[in-house]
Image: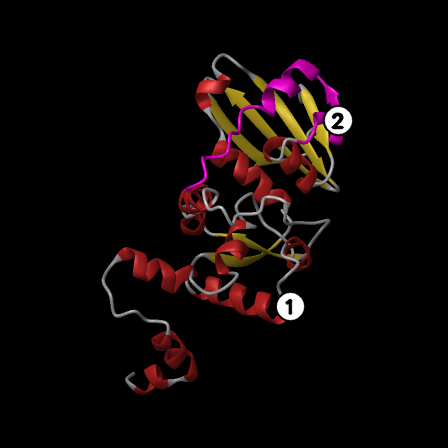
C-alpha cells in the first residue's frame, strides 16, 4: 500500500498540499487550480456536455478542461453520467456535495465585484449571469413583487421566480412566464449592471414587471 502512494498521481497531489488544517487551505486543494471554480460554476444549474462547457469557458483549452473535470471527478465534486434517450450523450454534472459550493462561489463573486479592477463588460456565460442575479438580488427592493421571469440565451432557457422576497432560478424552457428576456448573457449583464437601456434586449410580456425586475440587482460599492 505504501508503494501506491508514490505514483505520479500521488506526487501531483502532494505538490498541491498546503500542510494546513484550515478548511480554506483544503478548499483551495479541492478547487484551487486555475479554471476549476469556473468549471464547477458552469455545472450549478444541471448537467452539461463537454462541448457546452468549452463554449461557455472560451479561454480554456480542451486539454485543460479535461484535466479539471478529471480532477473534480476524482475529488467527488463532479461525475460523468449519460442522458436518457433520445439524447443518450455523456454529460458532466455536479454531485450533491459539489452543489453545496454554490453559496461560496456566489459570495466570492460578490466580494470580488467590489474591486476597482473588476470589468463587468468582459464575456459572461448564461450560468454566470444567472448566478450573479442570485448573488446580487436585493430582497428589500423586491418587497411585494411576485412573478416568473424567463430568459432565453440561444438554445438555453432559464426561469427565475420572485416570491415572498426570495429569488429562485433554475434551468428550464421559459414557456409559461410573465415576462421573457431574449438575448446574449452579456446584453442582460449590460442592462442589469452597466446602465444599458432595457431595449438592448428583446422583452416580451409584462413590461412593468420587466422594468422593475432589472432594478433588483445593485452592485456592491467599490473599495477605495
In the picture, measured across the screen, residue 171 lies left or right of residue 218, that is right
Alpha-carbon distance for marks 2 and 1? 36 Å
Label 1 sits on a secondary structure element that is helix
Q: Is residue 206 magenta?
A: yes
Q: Earlier in the sequence, mark 2 or mark 1?
A: 1
Boundaries of the magenta span: 196-224
Q: Which residue is mark 1?
A: 62
Q: Residue at x 62, y 52 (%)?
A: 48
Q: Residues within 10 Å of mark 1 (few under 14, many from 20)?
A: few
Q: What residue would you read off at disc 2? A: 199
**Front-most of 199 and 56?**
199
Q: Residue at x 39, y 62 (%)?
A: 30
Q: How many marks?
A: 2
* Residue 117 rendering spot, x and y as whole percentages: 51, 50
Q: In this image, 192 relative to 31: left or right?
A: right
Residue 123 percent across, percent down from the top left: 65, 49
- Image x and y of residue 142, in percent: 50, 18
From this viewpoint, which residue is outermost toward the top?
A: 144
Q: Residue at x 49, y 46 (%)?
A: 116
Q: Is residue 31 above or below residue 196?
A: below
Amino acid at each position: 500500500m505504501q508503494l501506491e502512494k508514490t505514483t505520479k498521481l500521488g506526487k501531483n497531489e502532494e505538490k498541491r498540499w498546503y500542510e494546513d488544517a484550515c478548511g480554506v487551505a483544503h478548499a483551495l486543494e479541492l478547487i484551487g487550480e486555475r479554471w476549476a471554480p469556473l468549471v464547477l460554476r458552469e455545472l450549478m444549474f444541471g448537467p452539461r456536455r463537454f462541448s457546452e462547457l468549452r463554449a461557455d469557458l472560451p479561454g480554456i483549452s480542451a486539454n485543460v478542461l479535461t484535466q479539471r473535470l478529471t480532477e473534480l471527478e476524482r475529488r467527488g465534486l463532479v461525475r460523468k453520467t449519460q442522458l436518457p434517450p433520445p439524447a443518450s450523450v455523456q454529460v458532466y454534472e455536479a454531485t450533491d456535495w459539489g452543489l453545496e459550493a454554490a453559496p461560496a462561489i456566489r459570495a466570492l463573486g460578490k466580494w470580488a465585484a467590489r474591486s476597482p479592477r473588476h470589468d463587468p463588460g468582459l464575456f459572461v456565460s448564461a450560468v454566470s449571469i444567472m448566478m450573479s442575479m442570485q448573488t446580487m438580488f436585493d430582497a428589500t427592493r423586491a418587497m411585494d413583487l411576485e412573478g416568473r421571469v424567463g430568459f432565453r440565451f440561444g438554445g438555453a432557457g432559464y426561469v427565475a421566480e420572485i416570491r415572498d422576497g426570495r429569488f429562485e432560478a433554475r434551468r428550464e424552457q421559459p414557456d409559461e412566464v410573465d415576462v421573457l428576456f431574449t438575448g446574449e448573457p452579456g446584453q442582460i449583464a449590460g442592462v442589469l449592471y452597466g446602465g444599458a437601456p432595457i431595449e438592448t434586449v428583446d422583452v416580451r410580456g409584462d413590461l412593468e414587471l420587466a422594468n422593475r425586475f432589472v432594478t433588483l440587482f445593485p452592485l456592491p460599492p467599490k473599495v477605495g
